[in-house]
Amino acid sequence: MAEAFLLESNLAQSRVYFDSLNLLSLKHPKDPGVSINIMTTELAYADFYLQKKQPDLAYVYILRANHIDRKLLGDIDRIQLDLMTGKMLVEQKEYAKALPLLESSATVGYEIGPEVYLSLLQTLSLCYSRLNRWQDAYLTLERYVPLRDSLYLESSKKSIADAEGKYQNKAKQQQIDEQKSELEFVRKQRLWLTAAALMFILIAALLIVIYRNKQKSAANLNAKNIELGRVIVALEEANKTKAKLFGILSHDLRSPISQVYQFLKLQKLNPGLLTEIQKKELSHKIETATASLLETMEELLVWSKTQMNSFNFDIRPVEVFSLVKNSLNLLQLNIEANQTIIENAIPEDLIIQTDEYFLQTILRNLLQNAIKASGENGEIHISYQEESSGSAIVIANTGNEFSQDDYESALVMDLLHQGLNGLGLKLVDELSVRIGARVSFSRLNSRTLATILFPN
């Protein structure tokens, strides 16, 4: 790059690359490639200043080039160095010192290039003549003249060929210009046709875009209508749920509250009219009505939460035995009132993956129904079974029969008309679906079996 900028007389830019080359030589002083690049660049600077008739500056670069280790240079590189050194000595009129270097370079011949070799012979002939070696000068000129004539002849042939080529190129250029004119006309026609085609394509594309936008708008409108329909259905369901809730509040809660109020009012107005036995019976009735009211309120609260999707289930390992025991403790008053015999055969180490609160609500409702159905001195047996389809908790009770058909009828019956007797069963069904269980009823050996199946 330094030599290329030097040929353009751009010394500043050439010096930048030459300095970077010198820095590289400091890092790799024994690298032949770097040394050769340094030497050829030094010689290029020397030749540049010799042509500028500044031999003193050329001498500086020749000396620096000669300081490079010659062992790192090739034969041609050494000859180029000797040739440039000899030329510099001739410019300084030190012909005796220049002669050995020029003679050594002349032994190579054409290998250093015809023009360089011709310049070498001319310089060598001059050196011989200045040293009064006329015979050697004459012999050198005899080698120089044929080579010069040969190069001139080749140069003349090349000039003639270039002139002929220029003439032919001119004729061809005229043909090319004519063809360009024709092509330009054809190109303009093609541009007009292309513009028309593009306009047609653009119009078609716009029509397609408009059509697709209409389709998209229609699809969005349809989706909005579907979503609106879902919202309307959800609102209707919410209204139905509110109607059910208010119907239950007005129909089923009024009776136990009225009973409690009448009992308390009777006891307050005529406390002396009641015997101790009547007071105990009245207290028992108040307790029963209050328990029924509490139980009804609890089931109503749980059911309303399920209708509002307020329950988030949490599946985790649950100890079933403790869960059954807690449910029985909550129903202890009912058990004692009916003198029901309870047998809890659930293994104490039984663990099931489910939601603890949901399962406890299901168990409490099924046990409560079983206590009611078994009547006084009834029996309830709670067990665990492993089946092919999964694991099951079974609650068996004596008393009135309750079949799967009865269960399904209670589920499909309008809650407003069936009252709280079916509310617990609806709650059982909804909660069991949420935890992935299935509740069913069957009859075996004069007992009603309520089965909570957890599929595999």
Image (cartoon, rainbow, N blue to C red):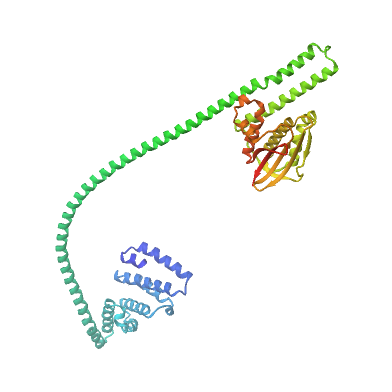
In which quadrant is the N terminus drawn?
A: bottom left
Q: Is residue 113 left or right of residue 20?
A: left
Q: Is residue 124 left or right of residue 418?
A: left
| Name of the residue lying farthest toward the front | 445
Residue at 24% in and 84% down? 143
The picture places residue 390, in percent across and down from the top left corner, at 66, 46
Total marks placed: 0
- Above or below, 385 against 299 in this view is below
Instruction: Choose between 122 and 405: the one closer to the eye.
Output: 405
The picture places residue 190, in percent across and down from the top left corner, at 21, 50
Q: In terms of image quadrants, where is residue 431? A: top right
The picture places residue 146, in percent across and down from the top left corner, at 21, 82
| Name of the residue lying farthest toward the bottom | 135
Q: In terms of image quadrants, where is residue 111? A: bottom left
Q: In terms of image quadrants, where is residue 398? A: top right
Instruction: Choose between 350 and 179: the one closer to the eye.
Output: 350
| Name of the residue lying farthest toward the right | 276
The picture places residue 105, in percent across and down from the top left corner, at 33, 82
Instruction: Choose between 372 and 184: the one closer to the eye.
Output: 372
Instruction: Choose between 19 and 454: the one closer to the eye.
Output: 454
Residue at 37% in and 37% down? 215
